[in-house]
Image (cartoon, rainbow, N blue to C red):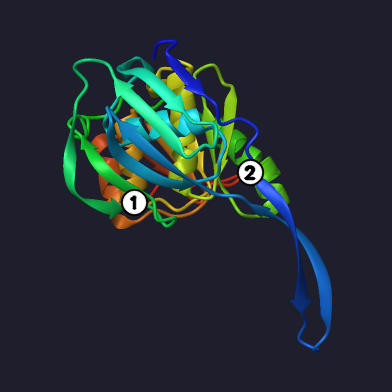
């Protein structure tokens, strides 16, 4: 991506305190205080046409935008985006693609996430790749990511209301991203990879969410050969992993993980 991009959505609230009451089985009622997640609707337009409407946690919106374009198959690299503007309220992201990067309109908006996210466009490059590069990792790499998850991420620790996605870059450093939607958290991690100009073949992802087929497809389109989850896969995600060479490691903890086959 060129320097022609700007993110004016700074200082947005990602959580806020609330008060309430707790009703106990014995009939007692006590006052409570809690921290809850704030959410935004981010509309992403591509070359002037609405492409996505995301319900998201309002932080790392540049990464979210780039990552969603990548995992939808519209772009492969940050340089495929000529201009990116995010408004100060965090409601609008305007993207202009460089010449030669195209997309086509979908016939209907389809929900893509439990948060009600909608995708309006499908990239002409949205076809799945022929295959992923061979994965190179050790069990200790997996356990290290699981340990980061065990320690908890900042926003989840205070609210209990987010999914997390951790990305291990080629140099061994780890990035942590959170969102109310597991798809968004993963997209933020992929967007960070693009901004850092990392080789996706040397990266690994750890998600707090389950792995249905659409999550596996995102990772395959991003070119990342290893996806780890603390939860479980579906039959379709296992089939996709076997077809494209994705190492899908599930039920991953700090001292164990599983790799399933059909």
Quarter of the rendering containing residue 255: top right
Of discs 1 and 2, which sits in the foreground?
2
Q: Is residue 245 left or right of residue 20?
A: left
Q: Is residue 237 left or right of residue 2?
A: left
The residue positioned 34% from the left and 42% from the top of the image is 52
Residue 234's x, y, as percent?
Answer: 34, 56
Which secondary structure lies at badge 2? loop
**Marking on residue 112:** 1
Quarter of the rendering containing residue 223: top left
Looking at the picture, tell me which residue is in the foreground, 103 or 132. Answer: 103
Which secondary structure lies at badge 1? loop
> How many numbered discs, if any?
2
Looking at the picture, tell me which residue is in the foreground, 178 or 140. Answer: 178
Residue 209's x, y, as percent?
Answer: 49, 51
As drawn, which residue projects farthest toward the top?
3
Residue at the spot of label 2: 14
**Marking on residue 199:** none
Q: How many other residues sit within 10 Å of disc 2, few (<14), some (14-19) or many (≥20)?
A: some
């Amino acid at each position: 991506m060129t320097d022609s991009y700007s993110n004016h959505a700074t200082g947005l609230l990602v959580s806020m305190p609330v008060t309430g009451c707790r009703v106990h089985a014995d009939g007692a009622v006590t006052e409570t205080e809690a921290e809850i997640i704030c959410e935004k609707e981010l509309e992403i337009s591509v070359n002037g046409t609405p492409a996505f409407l995301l319900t998201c946690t309002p932080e790392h919106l540049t990464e979210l935008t780039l990552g969603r374009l990548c995992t939808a198959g519209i772009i492969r690299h940050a340089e495929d985006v000529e201009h990116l503007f995010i408004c100060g309220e965090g409601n609008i992201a305007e993207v202009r693609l460089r010449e030669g990067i195209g997309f086509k309109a979908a016939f209907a908006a389809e929900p893509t996430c439990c948060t009600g996210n909608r995708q309006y466009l499908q990239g002409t490059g949205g076809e799945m790749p022929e295959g992923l590069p061979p994965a190179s990792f050790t069990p200790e790499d997996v356990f290290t990511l699981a340990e980061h998850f065990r320690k908890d991420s900042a926003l989840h620790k205070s609210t209990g209301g987010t999914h997390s996605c951790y990305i291990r870059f080629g140099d061994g450093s780890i990035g942590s991203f959170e969102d109310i939607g597991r798809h968004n958290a993963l997209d933020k991690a992929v967007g960070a990879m693009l901004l850092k100009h990392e080789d996706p073949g040397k990266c690994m992802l750890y998600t707090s969410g389950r792995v249905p087929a659409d999550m596996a497809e995102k990772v395959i389109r991003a070119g990342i050969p290893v996806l780890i989850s603390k939860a479980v896969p579906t039959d379709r995600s296992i089939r996709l992993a076997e077809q494209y060479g994705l190492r899908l490691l599930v039920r991953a903890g700090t001292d164990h993980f599983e790799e399933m086959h059909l």
